[in-house]
Image (cartoon, grey):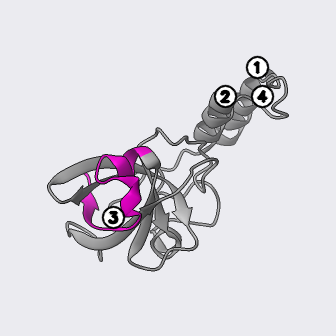
Amino acid sequence: MLGKSLGIVFLLAISTLTPVQGAGFFPTRTFDLVARAACTTVSPDPPDFLDGEQVNWDASFYQPGLGACGIVNTDNDLIVAMNHIVFDAYPGYDGVNCNPICNRPITISYQGKSVEVTVTDNCVACGVDEMQLSPAAFEQLADESEGLIEVDWSWAN
Protein backbone atom coordinates (compact mmCIF):
# COMPACT_ATOMS: atom_id res chain seq x y z
CA MET A 1 0.00 0.00 0.00
CA LEU A 2 2.79 2.45 0.91
CA GLY A 3 4.62 1.58 -2.31
CA LYS A 4 1.53 2.35 -4.40
CA SER A 5 0.99 5.62 -2.52
CA LEU A 6 4.57 6.71 -3.10
CA GLY A 7 4.29 5.70 -6.75
CA ILE A 8 1.16 7.80 -7.18
CA VAL A 9 2.80 10.78 -5.44
CA PHE A 10 5.83 10.39 -7.70
CA LEU A 11 3.73 10.20 -10.88
CA LEU A 12 1.65 13.21 -9.86
CA ALA A 13 4.78 15.19 -9.12
CA ILE A 14 6.42 14.19 -12.41
CA SER A 15 3.28 15.13 -14.36
CA THR A 16 3.59 18.72 -13.10
CA LEU A 17 7.23 19.12 -14.13
CA THR A 18 8.13 21.32 -17.07
CA PRO A 19 11.66 21.91 -18.28
CA VAL A 20 13.21 25.27 -17.47
CA GLN A 21 14.01 27.04 -20.70
CA GLY A 22 17.73 26.87 -21.30
CA ALA A 23 18.43 24.91 -18.11
CA GLY A 24 17.94 21.46 -19.62
CA PHE A 25 16.45 20.09 -16.44
CA PHE A 26 13.42 20.28 -14.18
CA PRO A 27 12.79 23.20 -11.84
CA THR A 28 14.87 22.84 -8.69
CA ARG A 29 11.99 23.27 -6.24
CA THR A 30 9.80 20.61 -7.88
CA PHE A 31 12.70 18.14 -8.06
CA ASP A 32 13.42 18.80 -4.39
CA LEU A 33 9.79 18.10 -3.45
CA VAL A 34 9.83 14.82 -5.39
CA ALA A 35 13.04 13.74 -3.61
CA ARG A 36 11.56 14.57 -0.20
CA ALA A 37 8.26 12.78 -0.96
CA ALA A 38 10.12 9.62 -1.95
CA CYS A 39 12.03 9.45 1.36
CA THR A 40 9.83 8.49 4.29
CA THR A 41 12.51 7.40 6.75
CA VAL A 42 12.23 8.94 10.23
CA SER A 43 15.55 9.95 11.76
CA PRO A 44 16.55 7.83 14.75
CA ASP A 45 18.49 9.19 17.69
CA PRO A 46 22.11 10.11 16.95
CA PRO A 47 24.73 7.35 17.18
CA ASP A 48 25.99 6.61 20.69
CA PHE A 49 29.42 8.07 19.93
CA LEU A 50 27.83 11.48 19.34
CA ASP A 51 24.77 11.33 21.57
CA GLY A 52 24.65 14.41 23.78
CA GLU A 53 28.29 15.27 23.20
CA GLN A 54 29.74 18.47 21.91
CA VAL A 55 32.36 17.61 19.32
CA ASN A 56 35.32 19.71 18.14
CA TRP A 57 35.93 19.56 14.36
CA ASP A 58 37.35 21.57 11.50
CA ALA A 59 34.85 23.29 9.21
CA SER A 60 35.30 24.84 5.81
CA PHE A 61 32.77 25.93 3.21
CA TYR A 62 31.77 24.61 -0.21
CA GLN A 63 29.38 25.35 -3.05
CA PRO A 64 26.24 23.25 -2.52
CA GLY A 65 24.02 21.80 -5.21
CA LEU A 66 22.29 18.43 -5.41
CA GLY A 67 23.46 16.75 -2.21
CA ALA A 68 23.74 13.15 -1.08
CA CYS A 69 20.32 13.43 0.58
CA GLY A 70 18.70 14.10 -2.80
CA ILE A 71 18.01 17.72 -1.91
CA VAL A 72 19.10 20.67 -4.03
CA ASN A 73 20.59 23.49 -1.96
CA THR A 74 22.06 26.92 -2.68
CA ASP A 75 24.80 29.03 -1.12
CA ASN A 76 22.12 30.81 0.95
CA ASP A 77 20.77 27.68 2.68
CA LEU A 78 21.97 26.91 6.21
CA ILE A 79 23.27 23.40 5.57
CA VAL A 80 26.18 21.12 6.34
CA ALA A 81 27.89 18.34 4.43
CA MET A 82 28.74 15.79 7.12
CA ASN A 83 31.95 13.84 6.59
CA HIS A 84 31.43 10.59 4.71
CA ILE A 85 32.57 8.47 7.65
CA VAL A 86 29.77 9.63 9.98
CA PHE A 87 27.32 9.90 7.06
CA ASP A 88 27.89 6.30 5.93
CA ALA A 89 27.98 4.89 9.49
CA TYR A 90 24.75 6.57 10.59
CA PRO A 91 22.27 3.97 11.93
CA GLY A 92 19.74 2.88 9.32
CA TYR A 93 21.68 4.05 6.26
CA ASP A 94 21.37 1.62 3.36
CA GLY A 95 23.25 3.43 0.61
CA VAL A 96 20.38 5.38 -0.97
CA ASN A 97 19.23 9.01 -0.70
CA CYS A 98 17.14 8.19 2.39
CA ASN A 99 19.91 8.24 4.99
CA PRO A 100 18.30 8.90 8.39
CA ILE A 101 20.96 11.57 9.02
CA CYS A 102 19.37 13.65 6.25
CA ASN A 103 17.52 16.72 7.54
CA ARG A 104 18.93 16.31 11.07
CA PRO A 105 19.70 19.70 12.59
CA ILE A 106 23.00 20.41 14.32
CA THR A 107 24.21 23.48 16.18
CA ILE A 108 27.68 24.76 15.35
CA SER A 109 29.59 27.27 17.51
CA TYR A 110 32.72 29.31 16.87
CA GLN A 111 34.17 32.11 18.99
CA GLY A 112 30.89 32.99 20.69
CA LYS A 113 28.75 32.75 17.54
CA SER A 114 26.44 29.86 16.66
CA VAL A 115 24.28 28.69 13.78
CA GLU A 116 21.81 25.84 13.39
CA VAL A 117 22.27 23.94 10.13
CA THR A 118 20.66 20.92 8.53
CA VAL A 119 22.51 17.85 7.20
CA THR A 120 21.72 17.58 3.48
CA ASP A 121 24.97 16.28 2.00
CA ASN A 122 28.09 14.29 2.72
CA CYS A 123 31.68 15.36 2.24
CA VAL A 124 33.73 12.60 0.62
CA ALA A 125 36.96 14.62 0.85
CA CYS A 126 36.55 15.29 4.59
CA GLY A 127 38.36 13.41 7.31
CA VAL A 128 36.66 11.94 10.37
CA ASP A 129 36.74 15.27 12.23
CA GLU A 130 35.80 17.59 9.37
CA MET A 131 32.65 19.03 7.80
CA GLN A 132 31.76 21.55 5.12
CA LEU A 133 29.22 24.36 5.50
CA SER A 134 27.28 26.34 2.95
CA PRO A 135 28.71 29.85 2.47
CA ALA A 136 25.72 31.36 4.34
CA ALA A 137 26.28 29.11 7.35
CA PHE A 138 30.05 29.67 7.36
CA GLU A 139 29.61 33.46 7.16
CA GLN A 140 27.43 33.41 10.29
CA LEU A 141 30.48 32.08 12.14
CA ALA A 142 33.47 33.65 10.38
CA ASP A 143 34.60 35.52 7.30
CA GLU A 144 35.20 33.29 4.28
CA SER A 145 38.79 34.58 4.19
CA GLU A 146 39.50 32.37 7.23
CA GLY A 147 38.83 29.32 5.03
CA LEU A 148 39.09 26.70 7.77
CA ILE A 149 37.89 27.14 11.34
CA GLU A 150 37.83 24.90 14.41
CA VAL A 151 34.21 24.60 15.59
CA ASP A 152 32.24 22.87 18.30
CA TRP A 153 29.01 21.16 17.27
CA SER A 154 26.27 18.97 18.68
CA TRP A 155 22.96 17.53 17.54
CA ALA A 156 20.26 20.18 17.92
CA ASN A 157 17.28 19.35 20.11
* Mark 2 or mark 3: whose residue is earlier in sequence: 2
The spot of residue 81 in percent (x, y) is 49, 59
Report the side of 5 relative to 155 (left or right): right
**53 or 38: nearer the eye?**
53
Q: Are marks 1 and 4 in contact (CB under 8 Å)?
A: yes
Numbered tag placed on residue 147 in the rendering: none
Residue that carries the numbered disc 3 in the rendered image: 46
Report, in whole angstroms, how far the alpha carbon at label 2 lies from the one at label 4.
9 Å
**Residue type at tag 2:** Thr
Q: Which residue is mark 2?
A: 30
Q: Quickly name the residue at label 1.
A: 16
Distance, label 4 to label 3, CA atoms, is 34 Å
Going 38% across and 67% down the picture, which residue do you hit? 148
Q: Quadrant of the N terminus?
A: top right
Amino acid on which the number 1 mark rests in the picture = Thr
First in sequence: mark 4 or mark 3? 4
Q: Which image quadrant is residue 29 in?
A: top right
Q: Which residue is mark 4?
A: 14
Residue shown at 57% from the left, 52% from the top: 69
- Judged by depth in the image, the label closer to the viewer, 2 or 4, is 2
Name the residue: 22% across, 58% down: 109
